[in-house]
Image: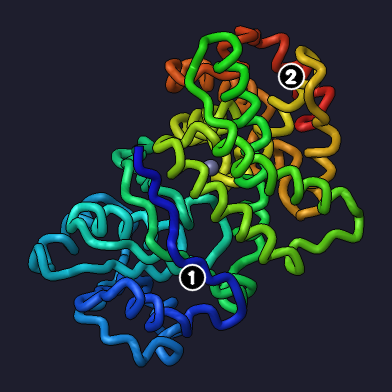
Amino acid sequence: MEVKIPSYVYLQKDAITKLSRVLEKIDSQNPIMLTGRTTKQLVERKIENVPFTGIFIVEKGSILQAREIIVGVSYGEVDTVVGIGGGKVLDVSKVVATELNAEFVSVPTTASHDGIASPVASFKENGEPVSISTKPPVAVIADTEIIKSCPRRLIHSGFGDLISNITAVKDWRLSKDLKGESYNEVAATIASLPAYLMVNRAKDPDFRLENEIETLLRGLIMSGVAIAVVGRSRPASGAEHKFSHALDYLGYGYGTHGEQVGLGTIIFEYFYEKEYGDGDWELIREALRNAGAPTKAEQIGLSRDQLIEALLYAKKIRKKRFTILEALDLSKEDFEKAIEETRVVD
Ligand SMILES: [Zn+2]
């Protein structure tokens, strides 16, 4: 099996000025750019030397928008799709690049989740989350100067998504042990090591996530690489992601993806600690709190009842992906105890 990982990763201040070099290195003759309106104004001057043959503004992050762009360019000519923006722009860019069989260059302007380097595009179609497998980026250009200025909430969301790899990898290992699922230690380590590193840094009360933006980005990029290594999201998505999908399906609260999986990580780490003696939910909670991320349901607009309902609903999602939810067949009472002891609800 051939594994595709990014050949070029630039992670520094003004990294975006490396874009023309990257395009030269991959011998791109016909690159197009997908971006947002505001981002375009923000980066225009820094990339004026890049000879884009087409520029597309992504208004809505939908599959339909991706199709419109694909129809608008002539197939076979575009060899590179450069996505410059947040989650929406990158998701649309991934699909466009994959459909046109072009290279994808990821230029994230936020650090909100591990989608910045992963071969998976996420959309909401008719209110339901949909994931599409795409080709991994050939290059990731993360300009810390631009990313630092994105809303703080998006940065702590990225922190939540990164540390969710801790329970995701435990779920994967559990499935290997109990169900014989194929498991890859390299991918598991690539996904979980940066997560543990961040948690340990963030246990310091003087921790400032803004100063750690580079480490966070490295972790999120590695997370995408881990997904590319096994060709599925397993290393970065377990029970805590099922819980987040449940909230999306039910339409409860107003948390971001990273905020939701962060809360889920506290709860499932609690079960790992309690049932298997393998975990430290207090450390996870402390780290999230020091990173400025929510540790309580009410912080993302969730009532106690909604939280319980979503946890129970999570058991119905993607049953084939075996996690601690399936292993323990957790009941309403188990969840009530967990959210009280972890003080996710007061
Ligand atoms: Zn995620």
Q: Is residue 270 above or below residue 138?
A: above
Left or right of 123, for residue 6: right
Residue on which the image places disc 1: 141
Tell me the residue that label 2 is attached to.
271
For marks 1 and 2, the one nearer the N-term is 1
Residue at mark 1 to residue at mark 2: CA–CA distance: 38 Å
Task: Look at label 2 and name its amino acid.
Answer: Phe
Residue drawn where x is 68% and y is 65% of the image = 213
184 to the left or right of 106:
right
Residue 60 location (% of width, % of height): 32, 59
Q: Secondary structure at mark 1?
A: strand
Q: Which image quadrant: the C terminus?
A: top right
Between marks 1 and 2 in the image, the one whose residue lies nearer the viewer? 1
Q: Is residue 19 above or below residue 115?
A: below
Q: Residue shown at 76%/54% (left/top)?
A: 292
Relative horizontal placement of residue 290, taking residue 194 as reference (left or right): right
Badge 2, how many Cα within 10 Å: few under 14, some, many 20+? many
Residue 329 position, x and y percent, is: 60, 7
Q: Secondary structure at mark 2?
A: helix
Under 8 Å from ligand 1: the CB of mark 1? no
Q: Which mark is residue 14?
A: none
Q: Quadrant of residue 19?
A: bottom left
As drawn, 126 above or below 172: below
State whether residue 312 appears in this view: no
Colour treatment of the image: rainbow
Residue type (three-letter) at the residue carrying disc 1: Ile
